[in-house]
Structure formats: C-alpha cells, structure tokens
Amino acid sequence: MKSMVHCLLFPVFGFCLACVASGEETVSVEIFSPTAKPLFPATLKVETLSTGYRLAEGPVWNKAEDCLFFVDIPANSVYKWTKQDGVSVYLNPSGQTGFAPSLKNGVIGANGLAFDQDQSLVLCQHGDRRIAKLIKSDGGKSEFATLASHFQGKRFNSPNDLTIAKNGDIFFTDPPGGYLDLENSDFEKGKVVFDTRHKELPFQGVYHYHRGSQKISLVTKEMNRPNGITLSRDGKRLYVGNAEGEAPHVMQFSTETYAGKLFFDGPFREQDKGVVDGMKVHSSGIVFITGPGGIHLVSEEGERLAHIRLDHPTTNLCFHPVETFLYFTTHTSVARLKINRFSEPTR
C-alpha cells in the first residue's frame, strides 16, 4: 500500500552545498545558561570531513580503531573516517542483506550504530528490519547475528536508532522510515511516498532488548515518529525524540517502569526547519539534540542551555572519547566542531 504523506522523518531542505563543502565555516552559538558556556571556544568552526552523500547518519566513534563510523542509508553502506586516510567503505551491504522483505529502492541501509560491551558493532538495519551485531567483516563479505527482529511474532518496521546500557541492554526506536519510497518521491516538489506493503505492526514503537534473557519489552507505542534515543548518565532515564515537523519534541521514560513525560519541546523558531533527530548525552549530563535550526543543548532537567545554529538539517551526532570534538552528520555531509573539555562554570 502506498500513501502520500508529509515528509516527517526525512525532510529535505535546500542549503548551500558550497558552504559546507568549503572545508570550514564559522557558526554562531546562542547561550541561555552559564552552564553551557565552558564548552565553547571563542570561535566555533565547522570542519567538513566528507560530503556528497544522500542521507548521512549514525556517527559513532570506534575506540578500538581510533576512527569514526557513519552511514549513508540509501547507499546501504557504513563508512570509516580517519584523519590520516580520510573516508573509505567499511561495510556494504550494511542494512539490507535479504534477511527480511523490504523495498528494493527504499531507505534500506543501516542507520543508528553503537558499540556493545565487547566492542562489537551493533546496527539498526532498515532493510533487514532488525537489530544486528556484526560478527565478521572480511573483504566486503560480512556476517551478522540477529539480536531482535520481531515483537509478538511480527516483524519490526525499520529500526532507526539505538542506545546501549552499561549492562548490555539495548533500547531502540522503530519508526516507518524504511518504507520511504525514494524512487517515487520527489522532495523538491514536496512529494513523499511511503510504501507500507510490508508493514506488520500497527504502531511505531520504542523497545527494550534485555541482554540476559533476550526478551523484548515495549517501552511505548504512543509516539508517531520515534527516532533519536539516548540514556542519561545513571541509566535511569531514556530520552526519545519525536521526528515530526509539526510537533518536534523529546520524551523522557523511566528505564524501569517505562513511565513517560515530556522532556523538551523548544521553543524552536518558526523559520528553523528540520525535525528532532539524533541525540547523545555528554559526560556533564547535558543532552545534545539535533533538531530545527541545528544542535540544541538541554540540561538533565529539560532546561534549554544553548543552541548551535546550523543552516543545514542535522541528522545525528557523537563525541570523541575525550570530548574535544563533536562529530555530526547532515543529509549530505559528515563534519565536526572543536569543543572544550567540560568544566563547571565560574559563577
């Protein structure tokens, strides 16, 4: 079944590619609280590492190889970036291997990436409609182990993003983004088509995979477009972004009871385009959220602390292990910002 809908999960907005492809650009930061001020140098510059992608996503730092991984979802590829060698293909296919029915020309690749306790790569695979662990990658031929593919006997839609707790449990989102029909959509004309012929679940869920029992629990099915997801420092709270253009917001859930409440909903400027997408928690506890107009910094109490203004839609982000760089992806590029090691502000 094909349906015409507004572009909620993968909005495409025009921006000057020459600006982000030029290597470096200065960006502005609005600071609303002194808590965030120590993070930012006097001049904040975006350094573009690579560009030319259709939908870049899922940045994660690989400590074992001292490199950045990220994906281009329509290209069905995971890429590796190092300062010395630049970008190379690490995995292809990354998200569609024939494991499950999916759209041939849809949004098929891997999306969210993370490393588990064993430093194994865990992927949200749109095309295969599962959470999978990379077992072996040898000369382009890869083997994956399925961690989660069904809930109550029905296949997931297209797992989008994930976060892994200290005990190895995985929390992940399952919106219908993998049903986006790229061949029949025309973003410039506002035509976005979802082909849901393979959809089995009647809702979009947020799930909890229990590592020990391999049981899957439903955290919530009340979010229309659950997308980015991350855990608080103590692991007791789960933050989940709702990627709807009409109602961008972040929910907070208890990881024990799954009780939920609104965590952050701006305010966002009307002219700022984009949706709430990826998010990560800094060692300070500050939640970094990609959303309308760039990257938003929010306290553990839901207070808006700062806003890094970016003119191009930002999809996801991650930190360097020592938190001297903030890496992020846009639709077409992967880039980074140099930030300061965090220290408490002087009042």
Image (spheres, grey):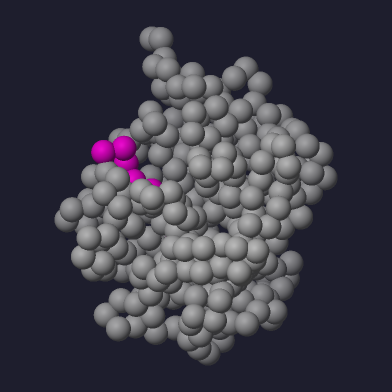
Residue 116 spot, x, y in % from top left: 39, 51
Q: Out of 125 and 248, give the one closest to the viewer.
A: 125
Residue at the outermost left position:
257
Q: Is residue 269 visible?
A: no
Does the magenta-highlighted stretch encompass residue 284? no
Residue at the outermost front position:
138
Residue 138 spot, x, y in % from top left: 60, 63
Q: Is residue 52 left or right of residue 79?
A: right
User: Looking at the image, which residue is at 30% across and 52% down?
Assistant: 168
Q: Is residue 30 left or right of residue 183?
A: left
In which quarter of the view is residue 221 placed? bottom left
Q: Is residue 25 left or right of residue 346?
A: right
Magenta region, main secondary structure: strand
Q: Out of 56 and 148, give the one closest to the viewer.
A: 148
Q: Which residues are magenta?
A: 227-234
Q: Is residue 302 above or below residue 11?
A: above
In which quarter of the view is residue 283 placed? top left
Q: Is residue 316 visible?
A: yes
Q: Is residue 186 above or below residue 110?
A: below
The quarter of the rendered structure image containing the C terminus is top left
User: Looking at the image, which residue is at 50% across and 40% down?
Assistant: 63
Residue at the outermost top position:
347
Residue 196 spot, x, y in % from top left: 50, 84
